[in-house]
Image (spheres, rainbow, N blue to C red):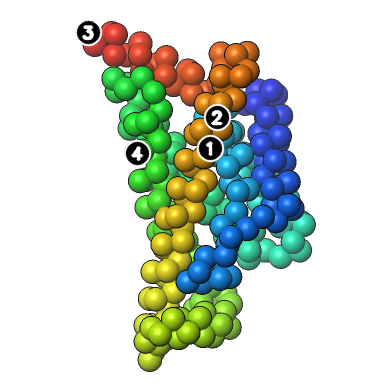
Amino acid sequence: MDTRSIALSAVFSALSIMLTMINITIPFPLLPYLKFDFSEIPVTMAFFLIGPQYALLSTVIYWIVLTIRAGDILGPAMKGAAVAAMIIGLWISSKMTNGSKAKNIKSLVSTGLIIGIVLRVIVMSVFNYAVFTVIAPFWLDYAAGLVAALGLPTTSTAQTILWVLLMTGLYNLLHTALSMIPSVFVTEATLARVPNLASNAWITQYRNNKQNQSGFKK
């Protein structure tokens, strides 16, 4: 891990923290305690610009600072787990699409979006189930009230948890798209305006590697 990439990891995590502090959020209508925000975009950009391992490093820094700032463990831990799952999904996608004939990041992002959604939904479903049943079961009473307000049946604890997990899964699906798709456009715009950064960016090396492998196969 080189010093420059570590420093850039800190910069991207700082951008994520800044966006968190600005606190521009959009409540998820079905479960208003879940909020869409833009703080995950810089960390996702770190994946494309400096690589998967540094994006995960940015995620860890982001999680640590959130924990210190919030004075709480649970909320930042869930945010960190969600972002890490999304980044790992992109990483898996980069391994799967490496060497393909595509010369842009469409295949990487489309595959990464699917894998990232699946991983994030699974990880956060398990995490939320643990919260409702073990870590903080009192949250289930609040969630049950929200489910009942939507006119959904909550005749049993299992039924309530199922509804909450389904709606939380939909939230994480949408949030993955909200974080990943804009980061691609911002990354492309950044590379177009800063040629020096483009030459050393991870996504540039990824593209060149695919082109070289495609040429070798020919």
Which of pointers 4 and 2 indicates the residue nearer the eye?
Answer: 2
Q: Amino acid at mark 1?
A: Ser
> What residue appears at the point 66 percent right and 36 percent down from the top-left corner?
12
The residue indicated by pointer 3 is 218
Mark 2 touches mark 1? (CB < 8 Å): yes
Image coords of residue 123 (percent x, y): 45, 58
The single residue placed furthest to the left in the displayed view is 218
> Marks 4 and 3: in contact by CB < 8 Å?
no
Mark 4 element type: helix
Q: Mark 3 belongs to which amino acid?
A: Lys
- The crowding category of the residue bearing disc 2, from other C-alpha atoms within 10 Å (few below 14, some 14 to 19, many at least 20), is many
Instruction: Answer above or below: position of 107 versus 204.
Output: below
Cβ atoms at labels 1 and 3 below 8 Å apart: no
| Mark 2–mark 3 distance (CA, rounded to whole Å) | 31 Å
Q: Residues within 10 Å of mark 1 (few under 14, many from 20)?
A: many
Residue 36 in view, yes or no: yes
Looking at the image, residue 176 sits to the left or right of residue 42; the answer is: left
| Of callouts 4 and 1, the N-terminal one | 4
Question: Gap between marks 1 and 3, in whole Å?
Answer: 33 Å
Residue drawn at (52%, 46%) of the image: 179
Q: Position of residue 110 (x, y in %)?
A: 36, 38
- Give the residue at mark 4: 111
Q: Amino acid at mark 2?
A: Thr
Instruction: Please give the residue where the numbered disc 2 appears in the rendered image.
Output: 187
- Residue 142 horizontal/vertical position (percent): 56, 82
Check disc 1 and report the residue beneath it. 183
Instruction: Give the position of the N terminus as an image quadrant.
Output: top right
Look at label 4 and name its amino acid. Thr
Q: Is residue 149 above or below residue 114?
A: below
**x then y, percent, for residue 208:** 42, 14
- Nearer to us in this view, 113 or 186: 186
